[in-house]
Image (spheres, rainbow, N blue to C red):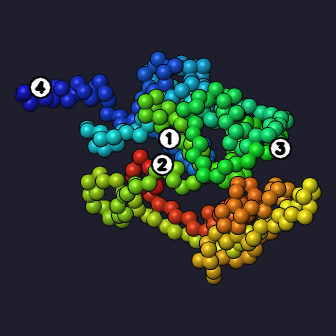
Amino acid sequence: MSLTDTLKNTLSALTEGGLNRYRLDIPSCTASLDVEEFNGREFMSELYYYEVIFTSSDQNISSAQLLTRPATLTMGTGPLMGLTGQKVVHGVVTHFKRISGSRDQATYQIIIEPFLSLLRKQFRTHRFFVNKSVPEVVTEVLQEHGLKGWEYEFTLKADYPKREQINQYKENDLAFIERLLAEVGIFYFFTLQPDTQTEVVHFADKQSAWTFGKSLPLSSPSGMSDNAADSVWGVNVRQNVVERSVIASDYNHREAQNILTSVPADMTRGDGDGVTYGEVYHYLPRHLERGDKIAPSAETGNFWARLEHERFLSVQTTISGCSNDALLSPPRC
């Protein structure tokens, strides 16, 4: 093959595929979309969102083509002329704006969030669930909104008891299930289903639900060539004084003789001496049993005390830094 043929093939590939390593696909919109810029944020136990600005030769893309519609943002990784991988973000369009227009093209902006974000729009003044556990109530709400069994997953260590009554009062469905999950220490995060390329929400209460094994070199930018290698830099560690222990107490009028006060919970097992301070005492109507002090059952006094101390410890150390690895995500450690 001659040099001329090689150049022609290269130019043809660039013309067809473009030089953009980022791609936006919205099946309900037939117009050609070219990503100009984007920014996004991903969290643990919060919804991710990506704000995407794109251009199109179609000057009149309507909101009906985009709002609540599925959308996929694909980010290619590696050298531009030979991408080696990709990160895919799937969700629905929750915001749409036409920014500007010229003779040749118009500029638009959308926000992509998981389908779960639409649960904010379902508001309840009051309803209640009888004889159901927290995971059962969350499952029922998700199914009400049409989520299939493969679109959510529970990975739970504890066996959560059925409650006599759970109330939803003046809150939307998303706020309701987030409140219930946070109460019992269940966190959630999102992954991508490989075959459908759509998001799956995972609910878990143990660290084994995360994906471990991610390793990146720690480097200090010096102006030298990094050979496009993924790395981490600018790592900062911040530490705070937090509460030393927590006691949880309650009173059950049906069995007034039972002591429902937990033992003091110190989840550092004594390693926090000198850097923690103070004792927190909670008297709240939420448990009917004291529970074992070593391995308490869910929603017992000792369970609540341990959980509350873990909440305080979660803000004791904060690590921040920068990375150029697009494949990083909250559940990957």
Observer-side mark, 1 or 4, equals 1
Observer-side mark, 2 or 1, equals 1
Observer-side mark, 3 or 2, equals 3
Query: Is the C-beta separation of discs 2 and 1 under 8 Å?
Result: yes
Category of crowding for the residue at label 4, using alpha-carbon neighbours closer than 10 angstroms: few (below 14), some (14–19), many (at least 20)? few
- What is the C-alpha distance between the residues marked 3 and 1? 33 Å
- What is the C-alpha distance between the residues marked 1 and 4? 43 Å
Query: Is the C-beta separation of discs 3 and 1 under 8 Å?
Result: no
Q: Name the residue under label 4.
A: 5
Q: Name the residue under label 3.
A: 164
User: Circle 1 sits in a helix, a strand or a loop, which is it?
Assistant: strand
Question: What amino acid is at disc 2?
Answer: Ser
Residue at the (52%, 69%) spot, across then down: 237
Question: What amino acid is at disc 4?
Answer: Asp
Q: Name the residue under label 1.
A: 191
Observer-side mark, 4 or 2, equals 2
Q: Is residue 312 above or below residue 12?
A: below
Q: Which of 138 and 3 is in front in this view?
A: 138
Residue projecting furthest to the bottom: 274
Query: Is the C-beta separation of discs 1 and 4 under 8 Å?
Result: no
- What is the C-alpha distance between the residues marked 4 and 2? 42 Å
Residue at the (73%, 43%) spot, across then down: 133
Observer-side mark, 4 or 3, equals 3
Q: Is residue 254 above or below residue 112?
A: below
